[in-house]
Image (spheres, rainbow, N blue to C red):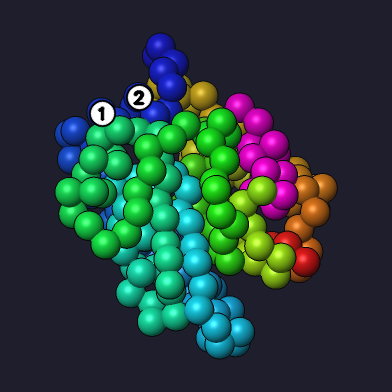
Amino acid sequence: MERRPATDVFHDWAVRGKDEGMERGHALSVAEMVDFISVKSEQRNSNFSAVDVGCGNGWVVRILADNPLCQQVVGIDGAKAMIDKAKSIDDDNQYICARLPDYSPTTKFDYIHSMEFLYYLDEPEQMLQLFHDNWLKEGGWAVIGIDHYMENEDSLSWPEHVGVNMATRTISQWETAWNKAGFNKVEHWVAGGEEGVTLVFVGQKS
Ligand SMILES: C[S@@+](CC[C@H](N)C(=O)[O-])C[C@H]1O[C@@H](n2cnc3c(N)ncnc32)[C@H](O)[C@@H]1O
């Protein structure tokens, strides 16, 4: 199948309403990721800011915004129809249509959340470095989930099936990239319940 930019494919998905299926499919794994952020912010007991990178229709932005300690949350995605949809549902939070890694935020965040985005980039390691250097405050955490990786054999046919390039890495290569980018307290687990395959990595800038 012909390969297209991921943002074009997901623009079409939003137009056809396929973003809602994605939301349902990612819900269990994202619940664990959002829970990680809730627990950390309760431990710190201070207000926080967050960004959801590759936010799709913004459903996780709205979950994060419901946390009483959350002061500001921004959603960023390069698919125009995803951001149009997010804005049509939610006037309270900020949504930005931007292509990564070219976009740089004007302020830094306490948390970066990102689900099923990073491997659509040609060089995800470079994005991890940018997250660490330019997007996170000191002490902030990145919480990133991916379903396409070498050990998840079912996912290896997705580039051909979806018609989009994906950066396929092993768990060990991801771990090296997180450490190389300068993150501390790097941990990973597989999220999403008994059948779950989401590889979640977390790491702190400190
Ligand atoms: C698999 S979807 C996940 C959406 C959302 N995180 C969710 O869980 O429902 C991947 C999202 O990443 C966005 N994306 C992919 N590559 C991008 C890039 N280079 N710049 C900005 N957004 C990108 C797509 O437009 C798409 O909305």
Q: Nearer the viewer, residue 17 or 88?
A: 88
Task: State the residue lying farthest toward the front.
Answer: 106
> Could one spot residue 194 in this view of the protein?
no
Q: Amino acid at mark 1?
A: Asp
Q: Quadrant of the C terminus?
A: bottom right
Q: Amino acid at mark 2?
A: Asp
Q: Which residues are magenta?
A: 122-133
Q: Nearer the viewer, residue 49 or 21?
A: 49
Residue, x 23% and y 40% (percent of image)?
84
Magenta span dominant secondary structure: helix
Task: Report helix, strand or loop for mark 2.
Answer: helix
| Residue 146, x across and y down, in percent | 53, 49
**Label annotation for residue 12:** 1
Residue, x 53% and y 36% (percent of image)?
103
Q: Tell me the crowding category of disc 2: few under 14, some 14 to 19, or many 20 or more residues within 10 angstroms, Cα based.
A: some
Task: State the residue lying farthest toward the top.
Answer: 2
| Residue 127, x across and y down, in percent | 64, 40
What is the tally of numbered marks visible in this picture?
2
| Residue 166, x across and y down, in percent | 54, 30
